[in-house]
Amino acid sequence: MPPGTSKSANRAQLTEAKRILDKLLDANPKPYPAYRQLARAAMKLNGGPQGLHQAHDLLTSALQIKPDGVNAKSLLGYVHAHERHSRRATGLFPDAAAANPQNLWLWSNWGEMERRRPRNAAAAPSVIRRWRCSGA
């Protein structure tokens, strides 16, 4: 949040941005980036399981438009990890990483998922090693 911005002002701006994106998608349902941004807005505005479910649906739509969408795969992996579906997330992160994206969120989301898994608490350093080798 920018300095000097209240939470209610930030929420109002996010709500307005969501309204504009919804209107854009009504007019043209093909803009892949709009689905990603709406997924982020859903998680921030609704929080919890409801926001994750909405984000999941939006990101699934984004990947139908652009199946190789690295950013949507990374964000969907994040959603799966927070829904405690780590097996689904585990399939998305390496697939997204194979494209060698310049997306640090991919590595952050992947490391966070690995850290949250009880039997893989020590796996986060292996994600860091992969990130360093990727050149991202």
Image: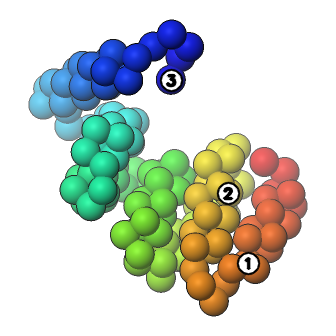
In the figure, 2 relative to 11: above or below? above
In the figure, 125 relative to 108: above or below? below
Q: Which residue matches tag 2?
A: 107
Give amino acid for label 1. Answer: Ala
| Quadrant hosting residue 29 | top left
Q: Residue furthest bottom?
A: 119
Give amino acid for label 2. Answer: Trp
Residue 111 locus on image (x, y percent): 67, 65
Q: Tell me if mark 3 has few (under 14), some (14-19) or many (20+) residues whose alpha carbon lies within 10 angstroms of its own.
A: few
Q: Which residue matches tag 1?
A: 123
Spatial CA distance of label 3 from label 1 is 31 Å
- SS of the residue at dot 3? loop
Please tell me which residue is depicted at 48% across the width and 60% down the height of the picture: 78
| Quadrant hosting residue 38 | top left
Please tell me which residue is depicted at 47% across the width and 69% down the height of the picture: 81
The answer to whether any part of residue 4 appears in the image is: yes
Spatial CA distance of label 2 from label 3 is 23 Å
Tell me, for residue 1, which label it has, or none: 3
Give amino acid for label 3. Answer: Met
Tell me, for residue 102, which label it has, or none: none
Q: Is residue 25 left or right of residue 114?
A: left
The answer to whether any part of residue 130 appears in the image is: no
Q: Which is more N-terminal, label 3 or label 2?
A: 3
As rendered, which of 81 and 9 lies closer to the eye?
A: 9
Q: Which is more N-terminal, label 2 or label 1?
A: 2
Foreground mark, 2 or 3, reads: 3
- SS of the residue at dot 2? helix
